[in-house]
Image (cartoon, coloured by chain):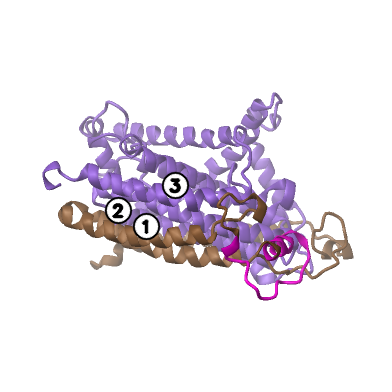
Chain colours: A purple, B brown
């Protein structure tokens, strides 16, 4: 088989499989959220469509497609229609650099389970993920309505503030790995300990940022129901409304995947070395893949758990936490990491 | 396939195509399948919890949002400077650590100035703990936006405070 054809075939295959995995997981997360929330509140949740409500997301999607698409008169048409697309596209793009498992061997060629093995890895994620802010801001602005505007500006202020802490929290990792490539980060954790243990402060900051960046409780002031109705998507209906949710839940999956990759060893299985995993060939890859997804699912459960545990912060508390606590803590983490990692003789 | 540094980005291009067509598919299909409703005055107006909106919708909002955006740009660039250092940290050794400590010190002086000026105090004046109300960022002597509502109430409170 021609090498170029093989390359494009596998790349397209990976794109289709991974994006669908992310979207299906996002849909199941919506269902999971409703069911788990229900359990936590001693009620049943949606359980009629399919076994235990498993087909509920499909029913919801169909219903969204057939709903009337109300476009209020006061909106700016072009931006109003573009905004949900701008929310979904970056969320899907960030999947590109996430390594889903050890390399598969197909027809004797090693195929890494990552769509694009970029050497700037995590920087690509940050660059693209921050584009998601535009979708939110434009939705708020183009709606030309009170609550969406407030939700939009709040959301943008919150997301850019926590992006700083996000950036600071991972620098400790790069100091240990000396590389931004996510495959190298995973390899470093297979050889040593997971960064969740060697970088506890960075891990904590990153988890907080994951909640703030995806506008999840306790940081969901941009769409606080009690004060802003539904925040920036108040004026949206039909599939456009659903697209904001798709973007948001895909972003949640991406953050779960990033936390698994950066701090929880990626596809690493505790007490199994990289050589042992490689010795099992494609079955080892599959095991790694399962391990990676288990970590993602655990973190996604954690999202829901926190939602029903911690009440929403006020907006001033959110901003104070990001700027007054997050930034100095991130800087302290970098300085501490520098002194710990320096060889003892150099001091 | 010709060798090029940009070859790594071919999958990104394909993925972008996929993501854009996915978004377009959703928009077009919901437009094709969606119920075509009739128009009426209530549907045409902005959502206002059932009330008829009295004032123009695009009101002014707190200047703090732009302050935060500006501070973000400054601090984000500083963080970008930290990344190359982090990657070359082991080679640079003690020299690099001292350099970056100086850099971080300058950065944190700027950060401390913002804190002292109250740039990150979003709570209404009475509720803030920083105790430095007289030099808050928004409490200039210029005219305040004239719109009603919570935000300008806060602005008025600030003006009274100073």
* Residue A164 visible in image: yes
State the SS at label 2: loop
Give the CA separation, mark 1 to mark 2: 7 Å
Residue found 37% across the figure and 57% down from its top:
A123
Q: Which residue is mark 2?
A: A180
Task: Return the chain for callout 3.
Answer: A
Residue found 23% across the figure and 66% down from its top:
B3
Q: Is residue A291 left or right of residue A236?
A: left
Between circles 3 and 2, the one closer to the viewer is: 2
Picture coordinates of residue A98, whole percent (x, y): 38, 48
Between circles 1 and 3, the one closer to the viewer is: 1
- Does residue A100 belong to the magenta stretch? no
Task: Return the chain for callout 1.
Answer: A
Q: Earlier in the sequence, mark 1 or mark 3?
A: 3
Q: Earlier in the sequence, mark 1 or mark 2?
A: 1
State the SS at label 3: helix
Q: What segment is highlighted magenta in the picture? A: B134-159
Q: Which residue is mark 1?
A: A123
Residue found 54% across the figure and 37% down from its top:
A303
Picture coordinates of residue A154, whole percent (x, y): 62, 57
């Amino acid at each position: 088989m021609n090498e170029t054809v093989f390359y494009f075939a596998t790349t397209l295959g990976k794109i289709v499989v991974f994006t669908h995995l992310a979207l299906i997981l996002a849909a199941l997360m919506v269902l999971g959220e409703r069911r788990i929330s229900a359990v936590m509140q001693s009620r049943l949740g949606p359980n009629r469509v399919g076994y235990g409500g498993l087909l509920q997301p499909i029913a919801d999607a169909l219903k969204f497609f057939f709903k009337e698409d109300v476009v209020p008169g006061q909106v700016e048409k072009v931006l109003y229609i573009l905004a949900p697309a701008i929310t979904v596209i970056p969320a899907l793009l960030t999947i590109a650099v996430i390594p889903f498992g050890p390399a598969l061997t197909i027809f004797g060629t090693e195929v890494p389970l990552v769509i694009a093995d970029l050497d700037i890895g995590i920087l690509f994620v940050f660059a693209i993920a921050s584009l998601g802010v535009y979708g939110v801001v434009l939705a708020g602005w183009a709606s030309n309505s009170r609550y969406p505007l407030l939700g939009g500006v709040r959301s943008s202020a919150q997301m850019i503030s926590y992006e700083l802490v996000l950036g600071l929290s991972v620098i400790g990792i790069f100091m240990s790995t000396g590389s931004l490539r996510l495959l190298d980060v995973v390899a470093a954790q297979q050889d040593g300990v997971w960064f969740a243990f060697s970088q506890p402060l960075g891990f904590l900051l990153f988890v907080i940022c994951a909640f703030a960046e995806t506008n999840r409780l306790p940081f969901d002031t941009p769409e606080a129901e009690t004060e802003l109705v539904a925040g920036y998507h108040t004026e949206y209906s039909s599939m456009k409304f659903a697209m904001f949710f798709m973007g948001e839940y895909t972003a949640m999956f991406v953050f779960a995947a990033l936390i698994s990759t950066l701090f929880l060893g990626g596809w690493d299985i505790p007490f199994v070395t990289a050589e042992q995993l490689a010795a099992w060939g494609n079955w080892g890859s599959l095991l790694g893949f399962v391990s990676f997804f288990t970590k993602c699912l655990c973190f996604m459960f954690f999202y829901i758990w926190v939602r029903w545990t911690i009440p929403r912060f006020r907006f001033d508390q959110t901003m104070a936490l990001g700027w007054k606590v997050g930034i100095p803590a991130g800087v302290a983490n970098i300085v501490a990491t520098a002194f710990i990692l320096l060889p003892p003789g150099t001091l | 396939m010709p060798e090029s540094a940009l070859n790594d980005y071919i999958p990104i291009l394909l993925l972008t195509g996929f993501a854009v067509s996915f978004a377009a598919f959703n928009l077009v299909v919901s437009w094709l399948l969606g119920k075509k409703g009739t128009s009426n005055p209530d549907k045409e107006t902005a959502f206002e919890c059932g009330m008829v909106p009295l004032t123009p919708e695009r009101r002014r909002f707190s200047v703090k949002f732009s302050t935060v955006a500006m501070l973000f740009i400054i601090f984000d660039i500083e963080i970008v400077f930290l990344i190359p250092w982090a990657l070359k940290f082991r080679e640079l050794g003690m020299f690099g650590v001292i350099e970056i400590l100086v850099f971080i010190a300058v950065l944190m002086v700027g950060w401390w100035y913002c804190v002292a000026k109250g740039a990150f105090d979003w709570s209404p004046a009475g509720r803030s703990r920083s105790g430095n109300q007289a030099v808050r960022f928004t409490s200039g002597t210029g005219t305040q936006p004239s719109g009603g509502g919570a935000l300008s109430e806060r602005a008025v409170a600030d003006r009274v405070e100073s």
